Amino acid sequence: MQHRIKVAAPVFIKLIFACGLCFLAASCQSSPDQPRPFVRDYAFDGSISRNVIESYLSRSITMMQLLQGWESTDENIRMLVSAGAKFAGRAFFVWGGETALPSLLPKAKAVAAKIHAMDPEMILQAGIFEIITPDVGRVSIPAWVFQEFGLEPEKRSFSYEAMLYKNGYGREFFGKNSSIPDMSQRETRMWFFYAAKSYIDIGIEAIHFGQVEIMDDNDPRHEHWNDMLSRVRAYAAVNARRHLVLCDAHVHGGIALPNGNLLFDFHSFPLRIEEVDGSPHQGALIMGHMDSLYGRSIGGVTPSGWKCAHLPYLVEFDNFEPSGKEGVNTGAHWIWGWDEITWLYLQSPEYRSEWLRYAWKWVGEHDPNGFLQMPGSRCLQPPRKWFFAAAKSPAIPDGIDLEGTIKQIWDEDQR
């Protein structure tokens, strides 16, 4: 969940500086390291080629909390398979309320098994985000977490305070008792490993790690991030469905370790839609707009071992906090005062379909390393509740029937 970055001045300067460096390093249009696949390939085991990862990213759709097992689940699964999706983004996670995670896992595992019975190639993505709350103190730490970190098992729960920045940065950033965790703290890495292993055990093959750059203030060389991710990848290499877990995060260009190895398997970021002056509520995509990722995805050596000048990435219709100026051009990262998914929801059916076709074409033409993640299921700004791309049905009475457009775009795609 990409929120507005309301950070302390030194951190804000750090992020702006990082964005500037990324822009200077890659201000011209990027190009892929190899031709796009016309024959798609979804086979991998233990590692993944660029051809295969791009095949998945080109059939990616946000299906927020699909595995939670709601009344809409079966209808959303139908849409997922019918449209030809291969990567279901953000299908399972908790945003705060950490104590719910253990109880949600059995139902999520059953839903994942149902999906994989219909399409064994489908990648389901979970999320571990840039938020931690005192509720984590009600989650008991299993012995295997202590053992993973070379510690003697003891009977205790995770510690909220032990995960926070000691200088107070990020405390209650998301509201009362909702803070940014510090990845340099061992307790944070233990929590992230606990959640990641739990996800892998239910059939998850991709994990989104949120806004890395606000969790790394005490980790300038990303040694702690690399430590945690290496543990997750090592576990996946033995225990995941296809011995691999794809890791990504919202990044301003990307993160490379000092040896040139990339931290993530692919990058991701919000679309960053710009208002069209003189055309209320209409939006456009623009190279170099704000901190958008177009043309800025860095390259290096991927976790699967292949080299690239620019790592493939996804752009998505993100959700974040309300602006308080809905319907107004705020000049910030909102689109006409709304977050991106709420803005899309509020458009006419005709303009929604037209804009989705436009965005798909624009991203492919302006940066072939980028892929639009289709909007399938996502929360909206209040008082609205949820975005469902599926057609209306008794299970999804609020469906907006965008699934036909998504399927048509993919059926006609020749990238």
Image (cartoon, rainbow, N blue to C red):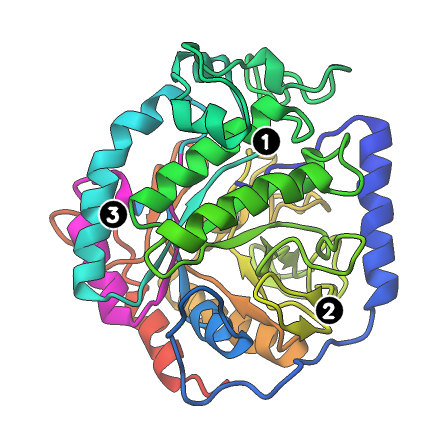
Magenta residues (range): 67-93
Give amino acid for label 2.
Gly
Task: Give coordinates of residue 398: x percent, y percent.
Answer: 25, 47
Give amino acid for label 1.
Gly
Q: Is residue 397 visible?
A: no
Residue where numbered disc 2 is placed: 295
Q: Residue at x 59, y 72 (%)?
A: 363
Q: Are marks 1 and 2 in contact (CB under 8 Å)?
A: no
Taking the image as shown, residue 298 lies to the left or right of residue 151, namely right
Q: Secondary structure at mark 2?
A: loop
Taking the image as shown, residue 136 lies to the left or right of residue 117, namely right
> Is residue 73 located in the magenta-colored stretch of the structure?
yes
> Is residue 205 located in the magenta-colored stretch of the structure?
no
Q: Is residue 56 above or below residue 17?
A: below
Taking the image as shown, residue 241 lies to the left or right of residue 322, namely left
Residue where numbered disc 3 is placed: 398
Of tags 1 and 3, the one toward the viewer is 3
Residue where numbered disc 1 is placed: 324
Q: Is residue 32 above or below residue 201?
A: below
Task: Give coordinates of residue 404: x percent, y percent.
Answer: 29, 71
The picture quadrant where one finds residue 114 is: bottom left
Task: Give coordinates of residue 381: x percent, y percent.
Answer: 46, 37
Q: Are marks 1 and 3 in contact (CB under 8 Å)?
A: no
Give amino acid for label 3.
Asp
